[in-house]
Image: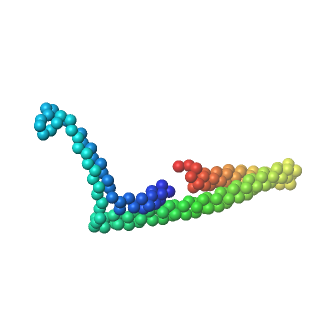
Amino acid sequence: MVKRATIGEHLVRDSWAHYTPVLLGIFQPAYQNPSNVFQPQYSYQAALVLSWALYDGGARYGRLSERRADRDIAQLQLGERLLETRAGLIVGLEEVRRAERALFEAKTAADLANQAVAIADLSYKAGATTNLELIDAQRRARDAQTAAVVADDNAQKARLALQTAAGHFP
């Protein structure tokens, strides 16, 4: 996109060349065998032709208008792409923050669930609770650890999406 906008700018800037005269040099060597009176064996012809288009029916002005329009379109597309990229980066950064916050909370919940298992185990050994409370605490601890692993996966996906939006991956 940047190259297209730059090329469009160069085409508009260099359009002055269509209004200048053109000098053309022509050189034509010739060889004739057998030679005759009118045509020697070796000869050449050289010419300089200067031409300047004074009127072309508006073709040059039309081309200039078209190039200006192409340049403007390329610049607008570049601006649109930059806005999309900025928006993608902002959304990606927010997604990474949200995913890392969820990961932190899931790890904290898993640690608290492990502490609850330790307390339930002590209570069961002391005879204060039944094995149902201990099994329930262990199940909740496994669920919390699973949620922490899922949150870690989501955080990594968000980081990868941010790097892709930043252009680090194709």
Left or right placement of residue 157 versus residue 104 in this view: left
Q: Nearer the viewer, residue 15 or 46?
A: 46
Residue 46 position by quadrant: top left
Examine the rendering and report whether any part of residue 158 can be seen: yes
Q: x, y (%) of residue 112?
A: 78, 55
Say if residue 157 shows up in the picture.
Answer: no
Looking at the image, which is closer to me, 117 or 81?
81
- Residue nearest the viewer, comparing 133 with 71: 71
Q: Closest to the observer: 62 or 96? A: 62
Q: Position of residue 91 (x, y in %)?
A: 61, 61
Residue ranking furthest to the top? 34
Residue 69, how many percent across, how many down?
41, 66
Does residue 98 appear left or right of residue 125 in this picture? Answer: left
Q: Residue at x 88, y 50 (%)?
A: 126
Residue at x 76% of width, y 55% of height: 108
Asked if residue 132 lies left or right of residue 1, the reply is right
Tell me how many marks there are.
Answer: 0
Q: Residue at x 51, y 64 (%)?
A: 80
Residue occupying image coordinates x 38% and y 59%: 17
Q: What sort of colour scheme is used for the picture?
A: rainbow
